[in-house]
Each structure stands twice: as structure tokens, then as C-alpha cells.
Amino acid sequence: MKIVVRFSDEKDLDALMAIDNIAWVKGTTPSERIHWDSVESFRNEYPPGSMLVAMYGDTVCGYIQLQNVTPLPSNRHVCELAMAVHPDHHGRGIGQELMRHAENWARSMGKTKLCLRVLSCNEKAVRFYTKCGFLEQGRLVGEFDIDGELVDDLLLYKMLLH
């Protein structure tokens, strides 16, 4: 089945909220979990058109979101990304396809650097980002106490070639 990536729209919000509620749990987020209680609150944070969604057939199975790191003009060439793929769809190339589209989207906005944060204990995500060409630019050692274990917060980046 072909993966289609497009900008989000109103009809995607329920599925995107559900992906967030499944994907962001202990080990992938420093909080206990991320949980959205309403589509309205999700829409306020991520309005239609604000992220790329991956479709596998008729199913929304993942997203990637880009945002400016700061409002400073000297930092406008950098954007931070966040992404999630529904666990039922891991291993289908959806993350790679989302990343490819996100890099093109970032370039179209004049961005030359992508960055992200990932927990060091999220080894699957660290491997994925490394495979996509991201490098470690910093490590906040022992940044989070998760169930009595100190976990590093990795700061990763990738320079975009035009």
C-alpha cells in the first residue's frame, strides 16, 4: 500500500489526537504521558494545516510537526520537529516518508537546520533519527527523573542542504 503525506485537515484531528495519546507515554516523554481530553484542546494547539500527516490507505497513521525554536530573527533558519507514528504502523517506512516530506517543507520555508529532543532511553527513536542523518549536538545529563532513574535528554540536529 502506498503512503501518502499531506497537510492535516479538520477530519484528521480525532485520529491525530489518538496517535498522541498512544505514542507519548513513559519512555517517550518526560511526563507520565501526554493525554488530550478533547478535540477542541488538540485543535487549539495543532490547528488544521499545521502538520504533515501520513496516510496508509484510508488511515491516518502518523504525523510530523515543525515549529520555530524561538521568535528571534537570528534563529529563523532553524526549526524543531516532533513526530509520532501509530505503533500498529511501525516498520512500514512511514517515519522515513514523513521525514523526507518535512525536510522538503522546511527547505521551502528557508530553513537550513532541523533540531529535536529525544530521551536517551527511547533507543528506537534515537536509532531512527540517526538513520535519518541526525547528529547529537548536546546532552542534558540526568535531565529527567523517570521512576527513580535519571535519563538524559538528547539534543539532535541535521543541517539541510539546498
Image (cartoon, grey):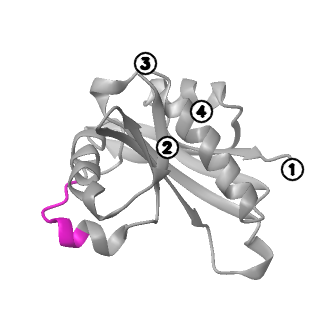
Instruction: From the viewer's perspective, tell me whether residue 83 is left or right of residue 36.
Output: right
Q: Which residue in the structure is indicated by mark 3?
A: 91
Q: Earlier in the sequence, mark 2 or mark 1?
A: 2
Q: Above or below — where is 48 with respect to 86?
A: below
Q: Residues within 10 Å of mark 2 (few under 14, many from 20)?
A: many
Residue range (magenta): 35-41
Q: Which residue in the structure is indicated by mark 4?
A: 129
Element type at marker 1? loop
Instruction: Please say whether residue 152 is visible from this viewpoint.
Output: no
Q: Residue at x 43, y 31 (%)?
A: 122
- Label of residue 57 in the image: none
Image quarter of residue 40:
bottom left
Marks 3 and 2 sit apart, C-alpha to C-alpha, by 16 Å
Marks 2 and 4 sit apart, C-alpha to C-alpha, by 19 Å
Q: Which residue in the structure is indicated by mark 2?
A: 5
Q: Which residue in the structure is indicated by mark 1?
A: 162
Marks 2 and 1 sit apart, C-alpha to C-alpha, by 21 Å
Q: Residue at x 36, y 39 (%)?
A: 28
Say what amino acid the circle numbered 4 marks: Tyr
Say what amino acid the circle numbered 3 marks: Gly
Q: Residue furthest right?
A: 162
Q: Earlier in the sequence, mark 3 or mark 4?
A: 3
Element type at marker 4? helix
Residue nearest the observer in this picture, 48 or 2: 2
Element type at marker 3? loop
Query: Is mark 2 in CB contact (under 8 Å) with mark 4?
Result: no
